[in-house]
Amino acid sequence: MGRGKIVIRRIDNSTNRQVTFSKRRGGLLKKAKELSILCDAEVGLVVFSSTGRLHEFSSTNMKAVIDRYTKAKEEQAGVNATSEIKVCIHSS
Amino acid sequence: MGRGKIVIRRIDNSTNRQVTFSKRRGGLLKKAKELSILCDAEVGLVVFSSTGRLHEFSSTNMKAVIDRYTKAKEEQAGVNATSEIKVCIHSS
DNA sequence: GGGACTATCTATAAGTT
DNA sequence: TAACTTATAGATAGTCC
């Protein structure tokens, strides 16, 4: 978007990269917030700039999102483990 | 964007909410990826739909992002603790 | 570094099949 | 209901301060 089309690859010029980071980070955080409101979704977004600075958004609080994420992943792993067990039983 | 302007509030109609969620989730994930590439940033994004389904993007891997986030937060807390100690020393 | 501007590109709301 | 289409709102690249 903007005056010219750009290719999605690392911006070499560090000044331009910083400016683009600042603009797009704002846009991304805004859209994350909009999604959470419009669609009643729980969203957690963490961004570290190339200089190591942290920026974040969470619709509730980040710890809650991370905990929920971790649990969801554990459950997924559980399901996979179960299906692997089933596979073992079937193939033996 | 689109044929009409919308207000950012929860979409009541569940069908419309689901359609909008699907579209905007895609857009958000894409922009998160673009930011990470263009600006050499580390990004982690977690989205739970209102029905509880998990969607995610991470520029490296989510565990690494969460660990880095946790450490950054601990350091922030450390800095704050230090300044509070300083305040105590000064005021005593 | 941060705003303001604006031409242009992209995302998407609404409509259609 | 999910795709596909299209008109339009919104994001942003380039620019100047």
Image (tube, coloured by chain):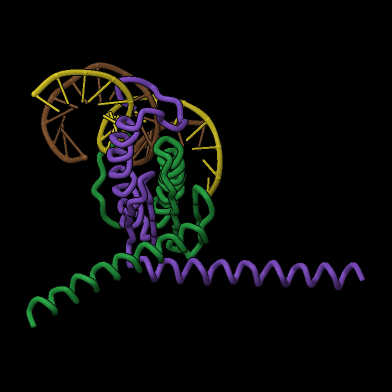
Chain colours: A purple, B green, C brown, D yellow
Give residue A54's position: percent from left, percent from top.
33, 54
Q: Is B84 situated above or below C17?
A: below
Give the camera-side residue of B83 and A10: B83
Residue at 40% across / 61% down in the picture? B69
Q: Is C8 situated above or below C2?
A: above
Give residue A44's position: percent from left, percent from top.
39, 59
The image shows a total of numbered marks equal to 0
Give residue A23's position: percent from left, percent from top.
28, 38
Say whether residue A83 is visible: yes
User: Which picture quadrant has residue D14?
Assistant: top left
Give the camera-side residue of A11 and B14: A11
User: Which picture quadrant has residue B86?
Assistant: bottom left
Give the camera-side residue of C16 and A41: A41
Residue at 34% across / 20% down in the picture? A4
Residue at 49% across / 66% down in the picture? A69
Which corner quadrant holds the C terminus of chain A?
A: bottom right
Q: Is D16 situated above or below D10?
A: above
Give residue B89's position: percent from left, percent from top.
13, 78
Q: Report the residue that reaches farthest toward the bottom.
A: B92
Q: Is A59 situated above or below C12?
A: below
Would residue B86 be found to the left or right of residue B40 on screen?
A: left
Residue at 36% across / 65% down in the picture? A62
Would residue B30 be found to the left or right of residue A33 on screen?
A: right
Which corner quadrant holds the N terminus of chain A?
A: top left
Would residue B43 be found to the left or right of residue A74 on screen?
A: left
Say whether residue B1 is visible: no
User: Which picture quadrant has residue A3?
Assistant: top left
Give the camera-side residue of A79 and B2: A79
